[in-house]
Structure formats: C-alpha cells, structure tokens
Image (cartoon, rainbow, N blue to C red):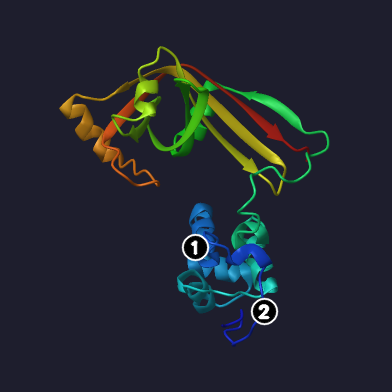
C-alpha cells in the first residue's frame, strides 16, 4: 500500500478498522463532504498530495499511516478513530462524561433544524404482546412531518394506527462527550392518496435494510421537544 508520500509502506491504522463496515476511504470521503471541502482543500490542510488523498478515498483497501490519519482527522475536525471506524462494534457514548457538562432544552425551531437533513431515527409504538418498542428507520422530512417507509403487513404498520406514537432522533459526539436528542410525538398514517404517494417518492426515502417496504408513513407532530449536552469551553 502507499503511505502519505505515495511510497509503498505497511504503516497500520487502529486494529479494529478492518472489521466489516469500517472502510477508511469511505469514511474519509464522507467526512470531507460533510465539511464542504474539496480533495485539494483537504489535502492542503492535511499536508499531503491530492493524488494520495484521492487514492485513499477510492482504494478498496486503503492503509494510511497513523500520521496521515491524524493529519486528516485534524483537517476534517474529527478524530482518527472516527475515520478508521474504531469502536464500530460498540454503542456510542463510551467515553467518560465531560466535567461540568451543560444540559439545555432545544427550541422547536432548533429541533426541526436537527431533523431537517433526515437520516436514521427510531419509530416508537406499542407492539402487541411485547409492549413499547423502538424500531430504527430511514426518514426524510416533509415540512414538519416525518416520512418513512414500512411494509403494510408488519407490526410497525399496526403501530402506525395507534392513537399516539413517537419518533426519536439523536446524535452523540464521543470525541467531545457531547450530543443532542429530539423527540417527536403525534399521530401517524399510511399514505394512500396517489398524488401524495408520488410526492413521497420524490423525497427518495431509501431503507438501508432493503426488502419490500412500499408503504409510506407520515407522522404529523403534536409536540416536538429536544435536549442538548455541551461540554464547557
């Protein structure tokens, strides 16, 4: 493999970076896009050639040295572990809580800002013979409404018909021991109107789990609340 000077080498990355789902190149490219940086801009910040960065992002088996990974993490305002996929088999929140952390309530407008981009959240309802459950789903926003997909004959579709349901989205920044969570409570329905279904298709809600999930669900909020934890400084 090539090191950050473009010379073959065998410098390693954290030991659990090679587990399934922890592709280094994909993570570097995704973090760079989130930062709004080009390959050239990122390479300049990290002190490496654009060609080498392009190689890392496109190679099926990149193996950057620890120094290169640290410089990329600094350039992209993240951590080497986040780029390498370290800890992927663990739930978030493994670091110790920040000293003197501050917990604040989010306004409804701030909650909607966190929800606006869509992503993965959890649909909360009561399942027969089991009780409250939280099922992860991919979602997009249509105004203030949460849109996701399901199969019309599974337990989640039955949950949609309940009087009150909720939807939870959160994010934890392990590196800074910070995070936020948003809870949407309201009513949900399976969309049946043809014109509305066509509009839902334009949102391109794509379930990561695959399978046949043709039913679109609209969750209309009655209440939106959220909280944020921030470390001092």
Disc 1 is placed on an element classified as: helix
Give the residue displayed 53% in from the left and 61% down from the top: 20
User: First in sequence: mark 1 or mark 2?
Assistant: 2
Coordinates of residue 48 in the picture (x, y in percent): 60, 76
**Mark 1, residue position:** 26
Q: Which residue is mark 2?
A: 11
**In the image, is residue 145 above or below residue 77?**
above
Image quarter for residue 204? top left
Within 10 Å of disc 1 (Cα), the crowding (few <14, some 14-19, many 20+) is: some
Q: Secondary structure at mark 2?
A: loop
x and y, in percent, of residue 102 in the image: 75, 30
User: From the viewer's perspective, is 103 left or right of 162?
Assistant: right
Disc 1/disc 2 C-alpha distance (Å): 19 Å
The residue lying furthest to the bottom in this view is 7
The image quadrant of residue 140 is: top left
Q: In x, y percent, where is residue 166?
A: 48, 22
Relative to the observer, which residue lies in front, 74 or 89? 89
Q: Quadrant of the N terminus?
A: bottom right
Tell me: 34 left or right of 10.
left
Residue in view at x 55 percent, y 61 percent:
22
Name the one closer to the observer, 35 or 94.
Answer: 94
């Amino acid at each position: 493999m090539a090191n950050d000077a473009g010379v073959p080498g065998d410098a390693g990355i954290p030991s659990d970076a090679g587990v399934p789902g922890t592709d280094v190149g994909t993570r570097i490219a995704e973090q760079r896009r989130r930062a709004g940086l080009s390959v050239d801009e990122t390479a300049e910040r990290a002190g490496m050639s654009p060609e080498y960065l392009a190689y890392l992002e496109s190679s099926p088996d990149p193996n950057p040295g620890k120094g290169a990974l640290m410089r990329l993490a600094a350039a992209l305002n993240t951590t080497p572990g986040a780029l390498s996929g370290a800890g992927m088999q663990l739930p978030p929140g493994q670091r110790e809580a920040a000293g003197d952390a501050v917990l604040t309530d989010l306004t409804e407008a701030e909650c909607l800002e966190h929800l606006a981009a869509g992503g993965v959240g959890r649909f909360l309802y009561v399942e027969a013979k089991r009780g409250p459950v939280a099922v992860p789903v991919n979602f997009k926003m249509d105004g203030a409404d949460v849109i996701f997909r399901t199969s019309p004959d599974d337990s989640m579709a039955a949950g949609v018909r309940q009087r009150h349901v909720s939807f939870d989205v959160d994010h934890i920044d392990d590196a800074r021991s910070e995070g936020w969570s948003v809870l949407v409570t309201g009513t949900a329905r399976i969309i049946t109107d043809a014109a509305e279904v066509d509009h839902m298709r334009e949102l391109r809600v794509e379930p990561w789990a695959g399978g046949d999930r043709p039913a679109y669900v609209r969750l209309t909020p009655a209440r939106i609340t959220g909280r944020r934890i921030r470390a001092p400084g």
